[in-house]
Amino acid sequence: MFEGLRLVSEAADFAARRHTGQQRKGRGNEPYVNHLAEVANLLSISTDGTDAELVAAGWLHDTIEDTATTREELAQTFGERVAALVVEVTDDMTLPKAERRQKQIVDAPRKSPGAKLIKIADKISNIRARIMPQANQDERDDLIDYLAWAEKVVDGCRGVNAMLDRMFDETVRAARSTL
């Protein structure tokens, strides 16, 4: 148990330091680390805290994509499974946005169970950040677009964890109710 708690704590610290100064889209430019905390928390809740490596990967899921962190660094610091999960959910930022989005839809059904859970938790968090009761038309359009795409990605990830699937559906319903 101690090893798992320590792994998660070290991953949180590492992710917070690597994402220092980054702001999240939506919700008034809150610190990016809030997104990472939410994803990790969703993973912990939906697995009853039984998979420390998955929760650590939730904290770290954007480090390769958004910082100078390498796969090798993650493997050395957090182990092979954590690094593999992070790589599996990392977008190729050299591709245009439309291609990255399409690739996520196509690749989702072939992801490992852990990567599917990270993808679903990430989409839940991103939708929640886009729900703004006083949204202007551009923000509403962004939410509509994001929902349509996220649902396609999550359709390929369903069936691994009923609780997370339900949470995604509830989040989508809540988002649609604001439109």
Image (tube, helix red, strand yellow):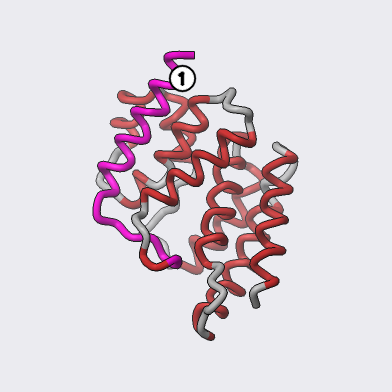
Identified by mark 1, the residue type is Gly
Q: Position of residue 31 (x, y in %)?
A: 34, 55
Q: Could you say which is closer to the camera, residue 61 or residue 83?
A: 61
Q: Position of residue 175 (x, y in %)?
A: 64, 67
Quarter occupied by residue 146 = bottom right
As for residue 128 lying within the magenta part, the answer is no
Compared to residue 72, the image places residue 42 above or below, namely below
Indicate left or right for 68 with 144 as reference: left
The magenta span reads 1-27
Indicate left or right for 162 with 128 as reference: right
Q: Position of residue 140 (x, y in %)?
A: 56, 79
Indicate left or right for 87 with 76 as reference: right
Residue at the image position 41 percent from the left and 65 percent from the top:
25
Indicate left or right for 92 with 46 as reference: left
Q: Could you say which is closer to the camera, residue 178 or residue 159?
A: 178
Residue at the image position 61 percent from the left and 60 percent from the top:
150
Q: Position of residue 8 (x, y in %)?
A: 42, 28
Q: Mostly what secondary structure, the magenta segment? A: helix
Residue linked to disc 1: 4
Residue at the image position 30 percent from the left and 38 percent from the top:
70
Q: Secondary structure at mark 1?
A: helix
Residue at the image position 44 percent from the left and 21 percent from the top:
5
Q: Residues within 10 Å of mark 1 (few under 14, many from 20)?
A: some
